[in-house]
C-alpha cells in the first residue's frame, strides 16, 4: 500500500515547483497587445463595515475580457482602453455582493470601492445539499467540458514571483506571457510564450546560496485543477481523501457549496487539505484554496528541492495554493492562481537557521478565441524547466509594461526594488570610478 501511494505521489504531485540552491562565493509580438490609448485607474477594494482590504477581488470591464485583481493589500491598478471608457466595471469577491460601477465615475487615483458582505438567511444557509460530497466533486470535474471554455483561446497573463528572507523582499521577477490554452475537454496541455520579463535581486541578502524557482509560470498554470485534475485528484488519489460539506456562501449572487477535503489518517505520504467552492446549481468549481499536509519533512523536501548545499538540510514548512475562475456568457475559465512555499535551511555548525519564502502568482488580464489554433513554434515556447530570473533583463525601463494590466505591487515590494536599484547604482558608480566607497 505504501509503495503504491509513493508511486502515485511522485507521478501526480506538483513536481514542477522545484527549488535550486547554488553556491556563489560569499566575498514575438503579443497577440493580445493593447494600444497606448488607455486610461489608468487605481485604488483599493474594502469591506464597507470595517474598511478591511479585500485580497484577490476581481475587477472586470463589462462586455470585454479585460480584468485584473487586487493585491494582498486590497489595492488595484486597471488600464482601461479608451474605447471602453464609457463602460462599466464589475467587482466580485467571494461572500460579498457584486458591485457594478460606471468607469466614468472613477477618479484616476485613490478610489475607495466599498463592498457589502452577503449575509445569508438561516434557511438558505441550511439549504439541503447533496448527501455525498465526494460524488459532487467527481461530478464537477466530469462536467468541465460542459461548463468551461471549450474552445482554443489565447490569454494574456501577468506573472510575478518573489523571494523573501524572513520578512524582507530580496528578489522579484515579473513577466507578461501568452497562454495558448486548449479546450477544457481536451487532454492537450497549454502552451506558453514569454513576451516580456524583468527582475531585481539583492544577492547580498541571500547568505551563501542563490535560490531559483524552476518552472516559472507553469507553477501557477498547473494549479488550474479543472484543466489539470491529475495534479491533485485522480481516480487513485480520490480514495485517499475525506470530503465533507461546510457552510454555504455566495459569489456573484450564486449559491456556493463549500467542500472540505483532507487526506485520510492512514495515508503516510503528504497530500493536500483545503476547500473547494462549487456552484450549487450548475456544479462548477469557482475557486479552490488548499495546502500540502507536511507530515514527513523528508518526503516533502524530495518533492520540491532539486539541489542543495551539502552542509545544509532543507525542507518546506508550508506549501499552499489558490485558484480562482471567472465567468463570461455562461462559460468559466482560469482567472488567477498563486503558490506559496516557505522553507527552512538548517546549516551545519551554525546556531541559527535561515527562513525563506518563495511565492508566485499569475492573473489573466485579457483573452480572445484562437480560431485558427495558432501555436508558437516549439523553440519559442516556454519550457517547464524555465527559470524566469535567468531570462529577465532588469528593472531599468519605467515604461516597461506600457498598456498591459499587471497586479499592483505591494508597498514592501516597491520599497525593496528601490533599495536594490540604489545599491546597484552605487556598485556601478564605484566600479566605474565615479564615486568613492
Image (spheres, rainbow, N blue to C red):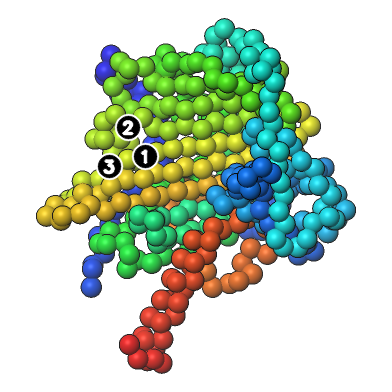
Q: Can residue 284 be seen from the camera position used here?
A: no
Q: Nearer the viewer, residue 119 or 392?
A: 119
Toward the right, the furthest residue is: 86
Q: Is residue 331 above or below residue 339?
A: above
Could you classify mark 2 by the number of other residues whose Cα lies within 10 Å: few (under 14), some (14-19), or many (20 or more)?
some
Of marks 1 and 2, which one's residue comes earlier in the chain? 2
Could you classify mark 3 by the number of other residues whose Cα lies within 10 Å: few (under 14), some (14-19), or many (20 or more)?
many
Q: Which mark is residue 318?
A: 1
- Residue 285 at what x, y percent from top left? 61, 26
Residue under label 2: 294
Relative horizontal placement of residue 426, taking residue 158 as reference (left or right) = left
Toward the top, the furthest residue is: 131
Q: CA distance from mark 3 to mark 2?
A: 10 Å
Q: Is residue 42 above or below residue 272?
A: below
Q: CA distance from mark 3 to mark 1?
A: 9 Å
In the rendered image, the quadrant that contains the C terminus is: bottom left
Could you classify mark 1 by the number of other residues whose Cα lies within 10 Å: few (under 14), some (14-19), or many (20 or more)?
some
Residue found at x 60% / y 56%:
408
Residue under label 3: 315
Residue found at x 47% / y 31%:
290
In the rendered image, the quadrant that contains the N terminus is: top left
- Residue 218 at what x, y percent from top left? 50, 43
How many labels were placed on the picture?
A: 3
Q: Is residue 395 above or below residue 209?
A: below
Amino acid at each position: 500500500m505504501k509503495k503504491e501511494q509513493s508511486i502515485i505521489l511522485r507521478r501526480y504531485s506538483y513536481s514542477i515547483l522545484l527549488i535550486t540552491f547554488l553556491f556563489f562565493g560569499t566575498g514575438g509580438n503579443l497577440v493580445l497587445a493593447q494600444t497606448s490609448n488607455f486610461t489608468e485607474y487605481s485604488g483599493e477594494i474594502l469591506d464597507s463595515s470595517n474598511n478591511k482590504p479585500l485580497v484577490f477581488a476581481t475587477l472586470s470591464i463589462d462586455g470585454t475580457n479585460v480584468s485584473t485583481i487586487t493585491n494582498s493589500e486590497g489595492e488595484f491598478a486597471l488600464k482601461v482602453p479608451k474605447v471602453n471608457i464609457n463602460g462599466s466595471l464589475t467587482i466580485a469577491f467571494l461572500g460579498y455582493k457584486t458591485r457594478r460601477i460606471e468607469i466614468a465615475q472613477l477618479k484616476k487615483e485613490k478610489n475607495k470601492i466599498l463592498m457589502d458582505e452577503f449575509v445569508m438567511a438561516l434557511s438558505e444557509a441550511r439549504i439541503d445539499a447533496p448527501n455525498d460530497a465526494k460524488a459532487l466533486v467527481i461530478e464537477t470535474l466530469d462536467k468541465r467540458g460542459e461548463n468551461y471554455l471549450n474552445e482554443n483561446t489565447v490569454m494574456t497573463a501577468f506573472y510575478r514571483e518573489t523571494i523573501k528572507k524572513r520578512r524582507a523582499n530580496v528578489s522579484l521577477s515579473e513577466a507578461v506571457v501568452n497562454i495558448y490554452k486548449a479546450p477544457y475537454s481536451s487532454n492537450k496541455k497549454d502552451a506558453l510564450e514569454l513576451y516580456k520579463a524583468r527582475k531585481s535581486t539583492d544577492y547580498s541578502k541571500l547568505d551563501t546560496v542563490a535560490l531559483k524557482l524552476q518552472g516559472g509560470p507553469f507553477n501557477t498554470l498547473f494549479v488550474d485543477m479543472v484543466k489539470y485534475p491529475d495534479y491533485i485528484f485522480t481516480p487513485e488519489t480520490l480514495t485517499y481523501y475525506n470530503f465533507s460539506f461546510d457552510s454555504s456562501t455566495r459569489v456573484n449572487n450564486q449559491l456556493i457549496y463549500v467542500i472540505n477535503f483532507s487526506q485520510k489518517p492512514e495515508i503516510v505520504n503528504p497530500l493536500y487539505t483545503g476547500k473547494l467552492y462549487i456552484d450549487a446549481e450548475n456544479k462548477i468549481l469557482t475557486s479552490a484554496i488548499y495546502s500540502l499536509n507536511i507530515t514527513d519533512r523528508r518526503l516533502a523536501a524530495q518533492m520540491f528541492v532539486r539541489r542543495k548545499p551539502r552542509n545544509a538540510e532543507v525542507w518546506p514548512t508550508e506549501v499552499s495554493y489558490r485558484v480562482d475562475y471567472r465567468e463570461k456568457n455562461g462559460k468559466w475559465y482560469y482567472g488567477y492562481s498563486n503558490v506559496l512555499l516557505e522553507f527552512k535551511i538548517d546549516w551545519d555548525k551554525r546556531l541559527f537557521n535561515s527562513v525563506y519564502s518563495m511565492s508566485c502568482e499569475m492573473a489573466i488580464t485579457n483573452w480572445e478565441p484562437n480560431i485558427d489554433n495558432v501555436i508558437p513554434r516549439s523553440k519559442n515556447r516556454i519550457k517547464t524547466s524555465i527559470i524566469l530570473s535567468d531570462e529577465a533583463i532588469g528593472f531599468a525601463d519605467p515604461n516597461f509594461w506600457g498598456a498591459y494590466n499587471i497586479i499592483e505591487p505591494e508597498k514592501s515590494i516597491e520599497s525593496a526594488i528601490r533599495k536594490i536599484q540604489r545599491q546597484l547604482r552605487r556598485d556601478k558608480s564605484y566600479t566605474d570610478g565615479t564615486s568613492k566607497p
